[in-house]
Image (cartoon, helix red, strand yellow):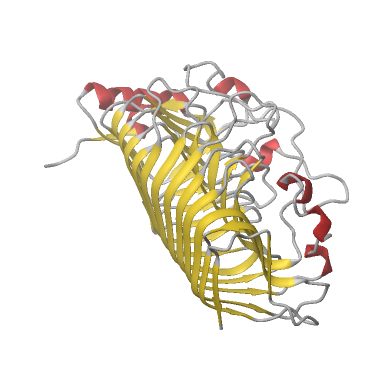
């Protein structure tokens, strides 16, 4: 069956990167939808645009050599209150404006070999004497692509570049396929996320190259603005390369549920702060509506971390975070600079987790160490640094099997390789622990119950 094509140039688009093509692009989308659907075709050229709105059965087809570029003028974008699900972040100096929008529409696609460019650098300033940083002097758009409570979504083959905020935000969507994207944001971009998947169901993400200054892929459970709130569930991510200065994969944010997600065959690097970050509560406990998400049934397998600060950060965040349980990580190889963290809270232990076939080599220097007397302070007060390659605390029924933890070229007063505290029913089976340099004590267990079983090599 032939798909009807609607060329934006036939509806008045100049494609010269100078003339504003918003109206022509929207006319093309409207005509395509009115005819029952088809492809809105962007031939090679640069199409300067403000907000455009997708409609049922419409595919944006960006041919190789085509660029859909975001305007730098606030007047060309939607208002913050254009739909009830939309939001903005005063704390992050991001508006609720978007370049490509789909709200409560079905059967939509963005595909082809072209590029969507958010003109991100135009909204930032480089501080004097600090070429490694961006500042936000005024207004900037929010998420470059915003798809909200949509069904049957496909994003394939396109490049997402220079977003002034998150690159692509999927909020409350169902039946989503994301494949073969290249996402690039200047690493100085503040909050320049790659893919943010929030309260979505049945999502497949594969074969993507993502390089950002903030989180590459995030699963979220922020239900409060949705018309039809539900969990973030049934998400499969595979065969991606992730480079960032923040988190390769982050799971958390909101007050709902994140469950049934599988991640496989990932390469994570770029000096990432955390290769994998699973955190129930990301916000301070005095922020209303952010009591944390329930996280359960999460699988990671075949993960290579080539250049990260910390390999694992699995924790509630603030003490009021909801439960984290049934976490499975197997086949992980990592070179890290600071220790990894696997912990619950005294009131809500982390329950039922298995780490198997893990090898983490730690090589951090003095700046990645912490006074051990601060280990029980709220996590955000010490930023997860610790004098051990792996710190486990407030866990029930957690098993580490057939794994090893060793040391690279390191200095500093590392106390232990693995430090366990307030553990119940936890097991170490076939675990090799190389003592830290200058120490003969690889393992320390404090306040652990008699049901803990340790078989180290």
Q: Is residue 66 visible?
A: no
Splitting the image into 4 quarters, where does residue 203 fall? top left
**Which residue lies at the image location 60% right of the left edge and 58% below the top edge?**
423
**In-image side of 34 versus 351 (left or right):** left
Q: Is residue 295 visible?
A: yes
Q: Position of residue 224 (x, y in %)?
A: 50, 23
Q: Give the side of residue 44 with respect to residue 210, left or right.
A: left
Which corner quadrant of the image does residue 12 belong to?
Answer: top left
Which of the image's four quarters has the C terminus?
bottom right
Provide residue 284's location: percent of width, then percent of height: 69, 33
* Pick the front one: 124 or 439: 439
The x and y percentages for residue 7 are: 31, 35
Residue 302 position in % (x across, y down): 43, 68
Q: Residue at x 24, y 21 (%)?
A: 34
| Residue drawn where x is 63% and y is 45% of the image | 345
| Residue 194 or residue 455, whichever sits in front | 455
User: Seen from this angle, which residue lies furthest right?
Assistant: 129
- Is 70 placed left or right of 41 in the picture? right
The residue lying toward the viewer, choosing from 128 and 48, is 128
Residue extending furthest front?
Answer: 450
Residue farthest along the left direction in this orientation: 1
Query: Quadrant location of the N terminus?
Result: top left
Q: Specify whether 365 is left or right of 302.
A: right
* Callout count: 0
- Quadrant of res 414: bottom right
């Amino acid at each position: 069956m032939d798909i009807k094509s609607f060329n934006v140039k036939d509806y008045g688009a100049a494609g010269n990167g100078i003339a504003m093509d918003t109206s022509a692009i929207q006319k093309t989308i409207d005509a395509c939808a009115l005819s029952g659907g088809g492809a809105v075709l962007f031939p090679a050229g640069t199409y300067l645009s403000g907000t455009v709105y997708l409609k049922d059965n419409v595919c944006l087809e960006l041919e190789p050599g085509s660029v859909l570029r975001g305007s730098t003028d606030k007047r060309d974008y939607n208002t913050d209150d254009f739909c009830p699900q939309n939001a903005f972040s005063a704390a992050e100096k991001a508006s609720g404006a978007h370049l490509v929008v789909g709200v409560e529409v079905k059967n939509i696609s963005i595909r082809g070999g072209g590029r969507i460019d958010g003109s991100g650098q135009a909204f930032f300033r480089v501080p004097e004497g600090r070429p490694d940083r961006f500042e936000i002097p005024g207004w900037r758009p929010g998420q470059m692509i915003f798809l909200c409570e949509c069904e049957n979504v496909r994003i394939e083959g396109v490049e997402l570049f220079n977003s002034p905020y998150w690159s692509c935000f999927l909020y409350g969507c169902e039946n989503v396929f994301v494949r073969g994207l290249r996402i690039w944001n200047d690493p100085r971009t503040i909050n320049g996320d790659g893919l943010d998947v929030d309260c979505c169901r049945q999502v497949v993400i594969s074969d993507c190259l993502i390089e950002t200054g903030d989180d590459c892929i995030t699963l979220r459970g922020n239900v409060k603005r949705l018309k039809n709130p539900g969990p973030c569930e049934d998400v499969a991510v595979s065969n991606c390369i992730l480079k960032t200065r923040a988190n390769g994969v982050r799971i958390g944010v909101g007050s709902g549920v994140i469950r049934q997600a599988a991640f496989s065959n990932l390469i994570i690097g770029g000096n990432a702060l955390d290769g994998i970050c699973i955190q129930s509560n990301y916000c301070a406990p005095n922020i209303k509506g952010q009591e944390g998400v329930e996280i359960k049934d999460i699988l990671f397998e075949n993960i290579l971390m080539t250049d990260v600060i910390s390999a694992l950060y699995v924790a509630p965040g603030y003490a009021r975070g909801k439960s984290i349980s049934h976490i499975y990580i197997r086949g992980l190889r990592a070179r890290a600079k600071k220790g990894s963290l696997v912990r619950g809270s005294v009131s809500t232990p982390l329950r039922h987790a298995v780490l198997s076939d893990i090898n983490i080599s730690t090589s951090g220097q003095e700046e990645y160490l912490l006074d051990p007397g601060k280990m029980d302070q709220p996590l955000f007060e010490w930023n997860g640094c610790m004098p051990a390659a792996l710190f486990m605390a407030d866990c029930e029924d957690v098993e580490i099997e057939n794994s090893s933890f060793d040391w690279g070229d390191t200095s500093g007063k590392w106390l232990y390789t693995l430090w366990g505290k307030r553990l119940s029913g936890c097991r170490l089976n076939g675990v090799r622990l190389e003592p830290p340099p200058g120490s003969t004590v690889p393992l320390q267990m404090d306040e652990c119950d008699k049901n803990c079983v340790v078989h180290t090599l």
